[in-house]
Structures are given as C-alpha cells and as structure tokens.
Image (cartoon, helix red, strand yellow):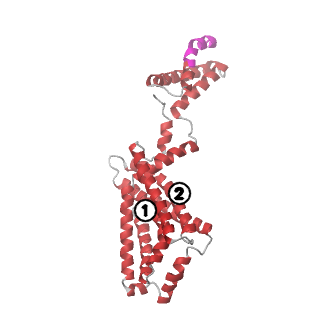
Amino acid sequence: MDLDAYTAARSADWDRLAQLAKRRRLDGREADELIDLYQSGASDLSAIKTIAGSTATGDRLSLALASARLRFTGAGANVFSMLPRFFVYQLPAALYRIRWVVLAVAVATVVVATLYAIWISGNPEVLRNFGTDAQLRQYVDHSFIDYYSNNPAASFSGQVWTNNAWIAAQCIAFGITGVYVPFVLLQNAIGVGTAAGVMFAYGRGDVMFSYILPHGMLELTSVFVAAAAGLRIFWAWIAPGARTRAQALAEDGRALFTVAVGCAISLFVSGLIEGFVTPSELPVWAKITIGALALAAFLAYMLVLGRRAVRLGETGDLTEYESGSRRVVAG
C-alpha cells in the first residue's frame, strides 16, 4: 500500500472526523456522520498499522479517533462540577419521592411514643419498674438535663452526629430486610415515650420539651427520612412492578443512596443544635425557634425544591448525570 496515496485519498474524511469531534454540539445528521467516520477511521488506522507500523499519519488519525471516542463514552465528570446538580436536583428529588412514606413513619412513631408515655405516666406500678422514686427524681431533676452539658459542646455534637448518622445509614443499608427499620423505629419510639412518661409523671413535661424540641425536630425527621428510604428499598424488592427485582433494587437503591448523604448533612445540623443550642442559656422560645427554622428549611428543601426537581424529570439516580454526559449531544 502506498501510504502517501492512501493518506491523500482518505485525509478529507480524517479531517472531517477531527472537526466534528471538536464541536461542542452536533445535530442528528452530524452525530450519525461522526459515528460513520469513526468506524471508517478505525478501519483505516488498523490498515495503516498493519502495513506501515507506527507513523506520523497513524498517530494523527489516532488522536482524531480518541477525540471522537470521548463524544461517545464521555470524559470522567469532575466531582465538583456534579455538586450543583446533586444538591439542586438529585437530592431533593430523592427526598420528595419518599415524602408520604416519611409522613407515615413519623405518624406511627409519634403514636407509639405517645401511647407509651401515657401508659407509663398514668400507671404508678409501671413507673416503678424504671427505678425507685429517688432514682427517678434524680433522672428528672438532673440526669436528663445534664446529659446535654456533661461534655464539651463540640465533642458532644460530634458524638451525637456520628451515632445518628450511623443509625440512619443502617436504616437505608439494611432496609431491604424488612425488619431492621421497624425495629429501630420501635426502639426509638419506646425510648422517647419512656423519657416523656417519666418526665410527665413528675410534672416536668415542659422541661422535656424544652430540651427535646430544639434539636429533636430536625433530628427525628432525618431518622424518619432514612427509615422511609430503607422501607422504600424493601418495597422495591417485594413489589418491583414491571421491573425485575434485581432491576428495581438497583434503580431504587442508587436513587435512595442520595438520601443517606442528605441525612448525614441534616443530622450534622441537628447535632450542632443539640451541642450548642439545646444546653445554652438562650430563652426556651429562642431555642425552639432555631430548631423550627432548621426543620422548616429542611422541609422546604425536600418538598418545594424536590417537587420542582421531580417535575423536571429528575429521579435522584446518581448514574443519570454520568450517563447523560456519555451521550453525543444533539441539538
């Protein structure tokens, strides 16, 4: 094969391949042309290497093919460039899609905790099972309150955040079992109900709410969200619909993984409130207002921004951005 003659005959197509590969946008006809030129160029490169080995002409064609290949496979997306999309679309969409499950989980937890508190506070025999009168008074007057100030605020916030984030992650990871999430929710409801029952039995219900509400509104909501995500994954396995179970678990699992990130962030905020605001000398109304504002911001992010993201077609699937960047962009 005469390499010079072959190059002269094919160089126009190679130049066109390089030109199309450099364009930011392609219409449908140009995208098809790029694919055809890529296929023919790959064959040309194979022929050149077979006959002539490594040549400057082959290297130039190889570069053009590499540029064209990026239009099909996409370059690796920069993590920082993905952050705006993640926080503006993917995360709120994933949260919005489980809103009704979150509500159901919250209502069930509140009902169980309330019934448990009423049962304890209204039955002296039951109350005695939790300790002597002296022990319970120690808990009501000191232990319950001192829990929030026994350790430095920063250290306490970190401990609380780590513990709660770990529980939230477990709810999502082990949600597929169908039993772990209800177990965690029941334990949480019993714990809150027990504390409330004891505090109300000794007439300190106001103290309990003043120390629970500031951080608890956002903290408990975050746990409810994680539990809802875990239950949603379990339901995808039980009732996959038209999808196979493997497909349903893969799709919903990817989408709901974003919820774990969101919960970690919201629990970090609630941990800061629990460490720095709850035990502070601020008026009770101020502390509860701070907690309410934090919850309102989270719910607005979940319901308002999430509704907008879902209407725009966002699913919360982490792979969508990557797969979208791998398509030849057509105008």
Give the Cα separation between the discs numbered 2 and 1. Answer: 14 Å
- Image quadrant where residue 176 sits: bottom left
User: Looking at this view, is 302 or 327 the one in front?
Assistant: 302
- Specify the label residue 22 is tagged with: none
Magenta segment, prevailing SS (helix, strand or loop): helix
Task: Pinpoint residue 282: horizontal percent, then vertical percent.
Answer: 55, 70
Q: Which residues are magenta?
A: 1-15
> Is residue 155 rendered magenta in the image?
no
Q: Amino acid at mark 2?
A: Ile
> Is residue 4 rendered magenta in the image?
yes
Badge 2 element: helix
Badge 1 element: helix
Task: Pinpoint residue 168: horizontal percent, then vertical percent.
Answer: 48, 61
Q: Residue drawn at (36%, 57%), measured in percent from left and top?
A: 100
User: Looking at this view, is 165 or 2 the one in front?
Assistant: 165
Sequence-earlier tag: 2 or 1? 1
Task: Pinpoint residue 107: horizontal percent, then vertical percent.
Answer: 36, 65
Q: Amino acid at mark 1?
A: Phe
Q: Quadrant of the N terminus?
A: top right
Q: Residue drawn at (50%, 71%), measured in percent from left and top?
A: 284
Q: Residue drawn at (50%, 44%), measured in percent from left and top?
A: 85
User: Looking at this view, is 212 or 249 the one in front?
Assistant: 212
Residue labelled with disc 2? 265
Position of residue 294 relative to residue 250, above or below, is below
Residue labelled with disc 1? 224
- Image quadrant where residue 158 sits: bottom right
Residue 249 seen from this side: no
